[in-house]
Image: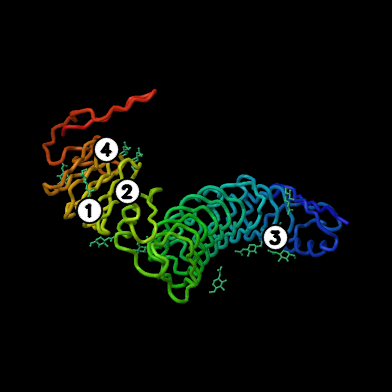
């Protein structure tokens, strides 16, 4: 026998719960439901088939591990609600503003609702008012897209968070390592599509369990993780992490298989590998930057070696965006450095002038600025096509162009004089002219 129980819960909780249950489960179900609704709504629950009333003092909902389906009921402005367990059901969608103004919420658990229509993590205006939240479990709920960058700032009391088994893209928010979430103890972020580097977590002194496996994380494992005082479990497997294999304290159960570490056993990487990783980090880890193993000289495309030492780096036309790393100066055998035709910004590091073997530095056609350091006369320096190089460019906010003034010169207005046209590209729709300027 099947009994249909339909609970219509007021304006604020106005969606219809339709629950189909077996007769033998009904006693259990009803006692569980009664327990869930605190205080018990003043309606005749049984044997009536419908329930109505308002829920101004509802604090606790636990309907997990049932077969509830359809849209999640909106919990909008249930100010007293502290605990929501709706996990292990079969909800199919989440209404807009469902979690707005849950000022008292401490535990939100929707885990394992595998048939939810893909949804984005709620915005600050929807979930950001739940400052008392200590447990957030949205494991396997079909969340898409990036997390809001300040999401962990919303929850200063956060203790346990699980967002694992979703499709979350983008970087791990910097707010994850901030002091505001210093009570964070357990963070499961595994089985998503997180990219970028692991943030500095050194303020998370209570963190004992950090699950990051099966994402697309890159860069070095930050040393701040090694000194976390409470850490006992960490998983880093199945990412693209680089550098040496991490070494954790003995008490820590760490897993790190299937990454891009320089060697398969513990120990330092070749110094040139570390230098290249630092150079690529300054460029935001471009696509082509994967170094395989512990020998940069196997690359052969962008790097050339002589007797195991890098003599030539050629990054021309790779759409690179970022700074020229001062770490280039650690490649002491470098003869040719070709960075032309990218979007390098910032200045030419002074440390490059210390490279003893340098013969060619081609930084033409980028977006460099600042003063040009003084190189030895045996260095062929090519700098054309960097409109602001050799100029003092203003700090942010002062109005880039207006404040660019010629270095060291008198304060009269200078005009840029095109020296020659270095390139004309013709396509059907446009002609691109590149000028060199006489300064
Ligand atoms: C809700 O709680 C408040 C304060 O505890 C009480 O005054 C009020 O009567 C309760 N409302 C209901 C409907 O029980
Ligand atoms: C769900 O209920 C089943 C049957 O009672 C039980 O075996 C299972 O452990 C429960 N799962 C969860 C996650 O509570
Ligand atoms: C969330 O609820 C599920 C049952 O639906 C339970 O298995 C899980 O442990 C809960 N998560 C947390 C963090 O307590
Ligand atoms: C979950 O809901 C979907 C669509 O509403 C239905 O097709 C499916 O059978 C349900 N799954 C379970 C395990 O109840
Ligand atoms: C750690 O906390 C201190 C003090 O609140 C703060 O100044 C620092 O920026 C925090 N570090 C990180 C990495 O967030
Ligand atoms: C990480 O953050 C801590 C605390 O704010 C700081 O002392 C430390 O220098 C940072 N580490 C790095 C590598 O930035
Ligand atoms: C954490 O490590 C302990 C052993 O140190 C293990 O029993 C436990 O299952 C681990 N937890 C997770 C989530 O991996
Ligand atoms: C580069 O050289 C400087 C100075 O010797 C050193 O402090 C730094 O750690 C080196 N960087 C790398 C990535 O090897
Ligand atoms: C450096 O560049 C010059 C001119 O392009 C070339 O002749 C020379 O072979 C290069 N040297 C190395 C070590 O790549
Ligand atoms: C070049 O870099 C600057 C600063 O990072 C950025 O604003 C600009 O969009 C980039 N231009 C191109 C063509 O990538
Ligand atoms: C050059 O960099 C500045 C900021 O550093 C940026 O605003 C500008 O768009 C860049 N120019 C190009 C052509 O990328
Ligand atoms: C340009 O910058 C340098 C170093 O910051 C400074 O010494 C010089 O006076 C500046 N020149 C002008 C014209 O602002």
**Residue at the spot of label 2:** 302
Q: Nearer the viewer, mark 3 or mark 4?
A: 4
Mark 3 lies within 8 Å of ligand 3 (Cβ measured) = yes
**Residue at the spot of label 1:** 334
Q: Say whether residue 333 is left or right of residue 78.
A: left
Mark 2 lies within 8 Å of ligand 9 (Cβ measured) = no
Q: Nearer the viewer, residue 63 or 330?
A: 330
**Residue at the spot of label 3:** 64
Image quarter where the C terminus lies is: top left
Whether residue 125 is visible? no
Crowdedness near tag 3: few (<14), some (14–19) or many (≥20) residues, C-alpha within 10 Å: some
Give the spatial CA distance, label 2 vs label 1.
13 Å
Crowdedness near tag 1: few (<14), some (14–19) or many (≥20) residues, C-alpha within 10 Å: many
Give the spatial CA distance, label 4 vs label 1.
21 Å
**Residue at the spot of label 4:** 365
Badge 1 or badge 3: first in the primary sequence: 3
């Amino acid at each position: 026998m099947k009994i249909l129980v339909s609970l219509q819960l007021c304006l604020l909780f106005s969606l219809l719960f339709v629950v189909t249950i077996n007769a033998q489960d009904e006693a259990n179900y009803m006692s569980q439901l009664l327990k869930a609704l605190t205080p018990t709504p003043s309606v005749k629950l049984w044997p009536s088939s419908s329930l109505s009333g308002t829920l101004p003092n509802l604090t606790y909902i636990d309907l997990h591990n049932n077969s509830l389906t359809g849209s999640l009921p909106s919990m909008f402005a249930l100010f007293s609600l502290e605990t929501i367990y709706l996990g292990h059901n079969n909800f199919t969608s989440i209404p807009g503003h469902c979690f707005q103004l849950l000022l008292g919420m401490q535990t939100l658990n929707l885990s394992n609702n595998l048939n939810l229509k893909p949804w984005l993590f709620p915005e600050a205006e929807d979930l950001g008012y739940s400052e008392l939240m200590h447990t957030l479990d949205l494991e396997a709920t079909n969340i898409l897209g990036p997390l809001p960058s300040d999401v962990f700032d919303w929850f200063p009391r956060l203790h346990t968070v699980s967002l694992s088994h979703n499709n979350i893209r983008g970087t791990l928010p910097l707010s994850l390592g901030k002091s505001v979430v210093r009570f964070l103890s357990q963070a499961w972020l595994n089985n998503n599509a997180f990219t970028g580097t692991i943030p500095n977590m050194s303020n998370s002194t209570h963190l004992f369990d950090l699950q990051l496996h099966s994402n697309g994380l890159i860069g070095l494992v930050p040393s701040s993780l090694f000194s976390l005082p409470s850490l006992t479990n960490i998983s880093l497997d199945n990412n693209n992490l680089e550098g040496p294999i991490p070494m954790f304290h003995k008490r820590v159960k760490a897993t790190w298989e299937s990454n891009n570490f320089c060697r398969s056993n513990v120990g330092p990487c070749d110094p040139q590998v570390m230098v290249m990783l630092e150079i690529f980090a300054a460029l935001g880890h471009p696509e082509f930057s994967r170094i395989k193993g512990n020998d940069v000289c196997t690359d052969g495309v962008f790097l050339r070696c002589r007797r195991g030492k890098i003599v030539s780096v050629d990054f021309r036309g790779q759409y690179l965006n970022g700074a020229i790393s001062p770490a280039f100066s650690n490649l002491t055998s470098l003869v040719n450095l070709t960075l032309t035709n990218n979007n390098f910004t910032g200045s030419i590091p002074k440390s490059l002038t210390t490279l003893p073997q340098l013969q060619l530095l081609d930084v033409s056609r980028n977006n460099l600025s600042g003063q040009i350091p003084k190189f030895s006369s045996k260095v062929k320096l090519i700098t054309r096509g960097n409109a602001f190089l050799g100029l003092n460019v203003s700090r942010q906010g002062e109005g880039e162009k207006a404040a660019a003034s010629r270095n060291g010169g008198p304060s009269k207005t200078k005009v840029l004089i095109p020296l020659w046209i270095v390139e004309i590209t013709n396509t059907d729709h446009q002609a691109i002219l590149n000028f060199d300027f006489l300064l």
